[in-house]
Image: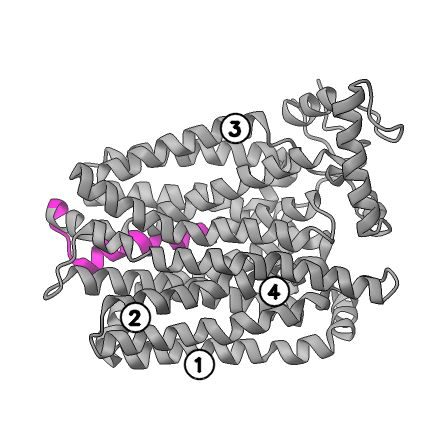
Amino acid sequence: MVSVPTNTGGPWNWPLSWRIIILFNLSFYNMMGNVFAAGISPLFGLLVQEFHCSVDEASRLASYALLMLGIINLCALPIVEYIGKRYTILISMAIFLMSNIWAANAESYNSLLGSRLLGGLSGGIVEALGPFIVSECFPQHQLARAMVVYVGFLAAGSAIGPILAGAIASGLHSWRWFFGISSIAIGINLITCILMLPETTHLMEDYLARDVITGATVAKNDISCLEDVNSSGNSMQAREVYSLKNLWIERSFFLRFSFIKEKENPVKLFLAPFPLLLTPAVLISTIIFGLMIGWTALTSIVISNVLSAPPLLWKPWQVGLINLGPLLGLLVGLPLGGALADSLSIRAEKKAKGEHDPRSRLPAVIIGALISPAGCLVIGFSLQNQLHWIGIAIGWAMLAFGLTASANILLTYSVDCFRTRAGHVGVLVNVVKNGLAFGVSFASMDWFSRVGPAAQFGTMAGMLWVGYLAIIPLYFYSQSLVRMSEGFL
């Protein structure tokens, strides 16, 4: 039987084209999980008609899926310990595909709810593994750009899902086709992951080796690796034992997963991420990321219900199209949360003569910290005064802008501070964000009816600004806080 090879030098030495394909395979799967969870909102009217359920019951189809997306993150690392990241993702994707097929054929509300629970559990595993795999595949000078692609796809799912659902429901006059077309997309993604999602697990020594490689050296290695493969086609560099073909086969189709180190107790692995919540870097990043996702989910549910109810009575495709606003906001934020953050990091490293400081990316958070909470105020004011729908769309775009322009930078900062525990950071971020999203979405319409949109969205903006203010001491005392944190981890 073939084991996972551990002497290949680590995924950061793989061809850049491999790592980009892995990133997009991973990100697309993550996006489809959020398409599944959030895409159902424009379909509430059709579901109420067919299953004779209440609007609150229809909203729970989105809320419970979000809850399952978060809960399963806690089980991801114990599963990975025994079967590896590749097979964990492939098996979960196969189950996710089946849950979408089940949803497309559900004949009752309870059956559809069951498919939503299973889909959330299976589709959520990749959320915990995403930051882990991205951290393993991309060195520090590329980390923010890679992470912003991952976060961008994650957040885009919440906008693309409703757009597709509304268009499909209106064009094909059936909510079932949304899950049918999603099943096709997931099936294609499963095939591409089978072909190019090799196991990225390696030993602690690989992390230590990477830490002494500067960004310029890594970039040079990337280029030389590609040149060796494309021009000579004979062999890799002397330090790479396996040819690309053998590496791909052994990392993709191994029959026995083995570490040199002993496997840890599953209960210990289950509890391992939680001490990181005592570290200021991870705690603040987790809270802000969770609030951003939570407010995005709440906004989707509130706006879908308000626009589809009397007196507006928007059609599903119209409700879906207003999600173009947040999608545009996410796209505008990509270069700020990726290229700008990495350029600040590279510049700071040059000034420090090669010494890397994770906090060097944090100044880029300022733009998103100002614009994103202000978007909440615009949405609340527009709903309160029954202004033109364009006000809602602009406010939603401003809110979503913060996900890629600022929340991504905080996630990158946390992963960069605790590289060897990137999987634990991913678990905590996703458990908290989906837990918050479930809580606020579950009570979203109740809250809206009780206090009104201006007070609701004003409170949301205030909480975001308080979270962002906490970044100021985090920046000035970053190094001492990280050293203190390492002392009790």
Query: Which one is earlier in the sequence, the residue at label 3 or at label 2?
Result: 3
Other residues around mark 4 within 10 Å, as few (<14) / some (14–19) / many (≥20): many
Query: Which one is earlier in the sequence, the residue at label 2 or at label 4?
Result: 2
User: Disc 4 vs disc 3: Cβ atoms closer than 8 Å?
Assistant: no
As measured in the structure, the alpha-carbon distance from the residue carrying label 2 to the one carrying label 4 is 28 Å
Residue 94 falls within the magenta-colored stretch? no
* Residue 198 shown left or right of residue 179 in the figure: right
Other residues around mark 1 within 10 Å, as few (<14) / some (14–19) / many (≥20): some
Magenta span: 50-71
Question: Foreground: 274 or 462?
Answer: 462
- Res. 391 mark: 2
As measured in the structure, the alpha-carbon distance from the residue carrying label 3 to the one carrying label 2 is 40 Å
Question: Foreground: 66 or 332?
Answer: 332
Type of the residue with mark 2: Gly
Query: Which one is earlier in the sequence, the residue at label 3 or at label 1?
Result: 3
Query: Which residue does the image show at 78% across and 23% down from the upper left?
Result: 231
In the picture, residue 352 is in which quadrant?
bottom right
Other residues around mark 2 within 10 Å, as few (<14) / some (14–19) / many (≥20): some
Q: In this picture, is 380 found above or below 217?
A: below
Per the image, the residue denoted by label 4 is 410
* Residue 334 shown left or right of residue 478 in the figure: left
The location of residue 466, given as percent across then percent down, is 51, 80
User: Disc 2 vs disc 1: Cβ atoms closer than 8 Å?
Assistant: no
Type of the residue with mark 1: Gly
The location of residue 107, given as percent across then percent down, is 18, 36
Q: Main secondary structure of the magenta part?
A: helix
* Residue 355 shown left or right of residue 418 in the figure: right
Query: Which one is earlier in the sequence, the residue at label 2 or at label 1?
Result: 2
Q: In this picture, is 54 found above or below 111?
A: below
